[in-house]
Image (tube, helix red, strand yellow):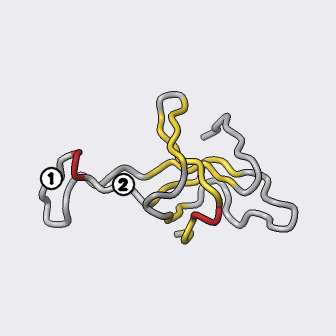
């Protein structure tokens, strides 16, 4: 997928995974009670900083903080723009 957003510096654009709609035991979770996803796929990366190149790349599955990033809507889809330091792990 090609995204026409180019983040600056150490920022990345993440497409969040869908929120869980059922519990492990199969109970449906109403939309008002669903947790914000903390997992997603990187769809665009910046150039990094001069002394700190980015270690993640487009396509990486990542875990990030519950309140990380800024939510944006672009061409009808929702994304998060966050700093690489907001990412906890690559899956």
Residue at screen point 70% across, 45% down: 7
Residue displayed at 14% across by 66% down: 25
Residue most extreme to the right: 50
Left or right, 7 with reference to 47: left
Q: Quadrant of the image for the N terminus? A: top right
Dot 2: within a 10 Å radius of its alpha carbon, few (fewer than 14), some, or many (20 or more) residues? Answer: some
Please say if 56 is above or below 70.
below
Return the x and y of residue 13 as percentages of the image width and height: 60, 48
Is 54 positioned to the left or the right of 85 in the image?
A: right
Between the C-alphas of marks 2 and 1, the distance is: 16 Å
Q: Residue at x 81, y 60 (%)?
A: 49
Residue at the spot of label 2: 36
Q: Tag 1's secondary structure?
A: loop
The numbered disc on residue 81 is none
Residue 57 % position (x, y): 67, 58
Residue 10 picture quarter:
bottom right
Q: Nearer the viewer, mark 2 or mark 1?
A: 2
**Label 1, residues with CA under 10 Å away: few <14, some 14-19, many ≥20:** few
The residue where tag 1 is placed is 28
């Amino acid at each position: 997928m090609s995204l026409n957003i180019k983040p600056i510096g150490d920022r990345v654009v993440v497409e969040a995974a869908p929120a869980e709609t059922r519990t492990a035991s199969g109970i449906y979770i109403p939309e008002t009670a669903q947790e914000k996803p903390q997992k997603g796929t990187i769809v665009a990366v910046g150039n990094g900083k001069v002394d700190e190149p980015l270690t993640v790349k487009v396509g990486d599955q990542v875990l990030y903080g519950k309140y990380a990033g800024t939510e944006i809507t672009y061409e009808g889809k929702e994304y998060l723009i966050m700093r690489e330091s907001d990412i906890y792990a690559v899956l």
